[in-house]
Image (cartoon, helix red, strand yellow):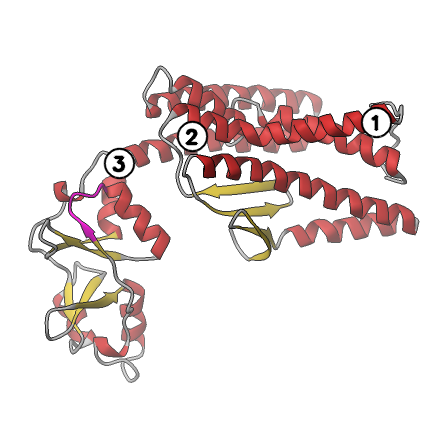
Amino acid sequence: MGKTFRIATVLGVPILVHWSLGLFFLFFIYVANKEALALSEVAWSILFFISLFLCVVLHEIGHVATAKKYGVKTRDIILSPIGGLARLESIPQKALQEFWIAINGPFVNLSIAGLLAIILLVFRIPFIPQLQYPVIIDGPILFLQLLMLINIVVFFFNLIPAFPMDGGRVLRSILALKFDRVKATFIASVIGKIIAIGLLAYAIISSQILLGFVAVFIYFMAGTEYQQTKTSEKLSNTLIIDIIVKNQIAKVYLQDKFAEIKNEHTNTNNFLVFNESENLVGTLPNWFLKEALKSPEKYTQVEDLYSKKYSSIPETYSMKKAFDIMQKEGMAILAVMNIDGDIVSSLDREAVSKLVK
């Protein structure tokens, strides 16, 4: 995702701002200068943009709160110029749970729009503003009108039944009530591609470049979602014990020389590190080995450069669990234990990569 900055934590979830959001505000400064906006107009515009991104955050919190209810953790929420993204650590296997997690984001926008509509009704303000180009927010009336309309647009846009919008996940969850998850995703991705092609055709006819880019993005994301789901299911249905070779451990010792490791283990990239007492004490990832070989005067043996982080997993775990641990803990290799707790093999990223190809 690139460089991000934490601005808050809600429900135990960090809210991060992507660096590209700064470009958005630079563009606003350029427009404000070009249109010679008054100080009050600049203030109302800034307040509007802040409120807009607050609505985005609340949308994502709708996902996060529902996911938390079902025991699904969220890694973080990332804000960027194109919207927000709540990165869940997993997708629930139960269709109805995914349905509610997906739909409660748009429902937040609908609730916000409803609240703003009540305020406009109370003060007898029309829902539809009289707009002129360029649109300049010069007071509370236009502020409330635009904020309500944008939340309505976000609600309907997010319910388009195509990935990566929430509507694509809603559609998949409904299809999953009848089909298995992979087939449901395949059908939803095909529907999403058809919608994308329709949007692209309309964008070309109406000369709407931005809509064209959105259509292309939706088309490719539909295929990506299907491939990711198919891969996830394959990993979930494969046990570690089914692919490892017993008593074949990518093992090195603290006193081993880096040059000898490279010569003796030409087909192995990641290693478990043991001490003289045969106790696991760390790992030697491929990038550590490469760094050591670049600086032989600085790093001679494993003890000079290795990671003290390591993790052991039962051989009865699925490959999906192993992959999740690698991702979460940043591990390149895991020790595999039998039922007695003895290390009987090792599993590295290359093994996972071969399985998903």
Label 2: state its secondary structure.
Answer: helix
Q: Give how far apart the Cα atoms at labels 1 and 3 are.
A: 51 Å
Residue 304: image location, x then y, percent? 26, 79
User: Residue 204's mark?
Assistant: none
**Frontmost residue, 209 versus 311:** 311
Q: CA distance from mark 3 to mark 2?
A: 20 Å
23 in the magenta segment: no
Residue labelled with disc 1: 120
User: What's the magenta region?
Assistant: 313-318
* Crowd tier of the residue under label 3, counting other residues whose Cα lies within 10 Å: few below 14, some 14–19, many 20 or above: some
Q: Residue at x 22, y 75 (%)?
A: 302
Q: Position of residue 288 (x, y in %)?
A: 30, 68
Please determine whether, in this image, residue 293 is positioned above or below residue 320: below
Tell me, for residue 236, which label it has, or none. 3
Q: Main secondary structure of the magenta part?
A: loop
Amino acid under disc 1 = Leu
Dot 3: element:
helix
Q: Residue 154 location, x and y as percent? A: 65, 29
309 vs 145: above or below: below
